[in-house]
Image (cartoon, grey):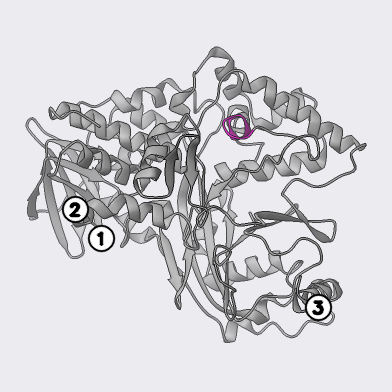
Amino acid sequence: MTEGATRREFLGAALAAPAILGGCARPDDWRTRVDGRWIGDNAQLGHRVRDMAANPPAGARERRCDVLVVGSGIAGLSAARTLHAAGITDFAVLELEADAGGNSRGHAMRGLPCPLGAHYLPLPGPAAPDIQAWLVEIGLAKQTATGLKWDERHLCHSPQERLFFEGRWQDGLLPNVARASSTQAQYRRFAKLIADTGRLGFALPTARAPWTPAHEQLDRLTAAQWLLANGIADPLLLAYLDYCCRDDYGAGAATVSAWALAHYFASRHGFSAPGDDTDDRDPVLTWPDGNAPLAQALRRPYADRVFTGRAVFRIDEGLNDITAWAFAGAEVERWSAKHVIVATPLFIAAHVLRAPPPALVATARQQRRAPWMVANLRLDDLPLDRVGAPLSWDNVIHGSPSLGYVDAQHQSLGRVVGPRLITAYWAFPDTARKRLLEMSWQDATQLILDDLRVVHPDLSERLQQVDIVRHGHAMSIPTPGLRSSAALAAVPGSAARVSFAHADLSAYSVFEEAFTHGATAGRRVARALGHAPV
């Protein structure tokens, strides 16, 4: 550690308490000098789509293709990739926003790249051969005699993550405790519970795992109920598990299903008590702008067929063709196609289809969605820090309502000097959606500063610019009964010439699920058009 870093940590420890109490802090004048704004998702346009679905305006520009893909998130781009690989060239992808990628879009602030949503991809295991093959195809891995060799430039550099706990930073996100403590005993108990439950079969993507009555029984309970029934009651462990649920699913252990919590660990690295086994952290691929390079790589081979700024507000399945109406700025387009792949969240699909299948409607009503806020903060320099583990890629405060922040420049190969950028993540309760949509960017920024002041007391002084995106319906929450719902299982095959492709079909939202559902829908359409899917 350098002398400057040591001094910075020392000052952070010395100043943190007065800053929190307000006794020695400078007047908080950031609102008068910081540039800030909401960016990204266009909620007003999304609501216009909802309101216009039943009444398409007269007069439209006629467009036609064999296959129309609605939505250019990872599922839509994966579907288009599969069509392209099968030799289908007459397709178009329509996207509501100005950029493709959905929750994997990226951004830049005065030349500094940063994410607008998802910011990593765990290395896919043997249950995800399609994703492995694609990552080899785009140069992120090489196939060798001993298995895949990953491009280390894009693997998360060390240190990967840290937790602020009991007044200092520590390595890892699970609170460190004495080996003879009751908390450590609870860690071991939970490790055994995950090992035993994992024998039922879990995989990522979920399509590669079985679904049995035992899985369905897990899906009937909340994660909190399951933990209590199995004697997991330690506050430190419960706080960590609640964070895991909020981070992956947008809601806490009292809301998501026990299946979801078990899947979180059993489909990946399992769980082990600190010091009892090897490091159970996932090796992950990550970039300064999050998963944007993955979305860009998916789009690149057919970029000329992705049309952004298209708000599809109605899809009608006729006798010979499927017709979709879309706003394209001030113009309305009327697209005709043989097949449509609806790669939007299921509640949007239920709105825009003139005659949505009953299974789709039932699923859309059952799903709850988590609102998210992703805030990129450009700083003139690193803020004061507390003692302990150094700045890491992922930085979390124990017990915080936030999900912590990511150092957007962590993957830089050279020494970083000058302005810095951090990305703060928040998952709001679904009951707080209106509050998020009505919040000013200044109030949202103050929420973040108040949360991080305990670890960075001079953060508001370092702040220069804030760009914040809010995802009002960011992800489906895997509530009890959703994953095992008969309606959800029926959605993919519920329409003849309309296919559905979205992570919602797995009851929760991650890259692997979206990619897989997109590829599945693409193969289905390729077969229907007489092409051999790859």
Q: Does the magenta stretch include residue 331?
A: no
13 lies above or below 74: below
Residue type marked 3: Arg
The image quadrant that residue 169 belongs to is bottom right
Q: Which of marks 2 and 1 is in front?
A: 2
Disc nearest the viewer among 3 and 1: 3
How far is mark 3 from mark 2, CA to CA? 54 Å
Residue neighbourhood size for the residue with mark 3, other residues' Cα within 10 Å, grouped as few (<14), some (14–19), many (≥20): some
x then y, percent, for residue 530: 12, 27
For label 3, the residue is 7
Where residue 366 appears, x then y in whole percent? 46, 32
Sequence-first disc among 3 and 1: 3
**Residue indicated by mark 1:** 309
For marks 3 and 2 on the same chain, the one whose residue lies earlier in the sequence: 3
Q: How far apart are marks 2 and 1 (CA)?
A: 13 Å
What span is in magenta?
Answer: 263-269
In whole angstroms, how far apart are the C-alphas of marks 3 and 1? 49 Å
Instruction: Say what amino acid the circle numbered 1 marks.
Output: Gly
The residue that disc 2 covers is 305
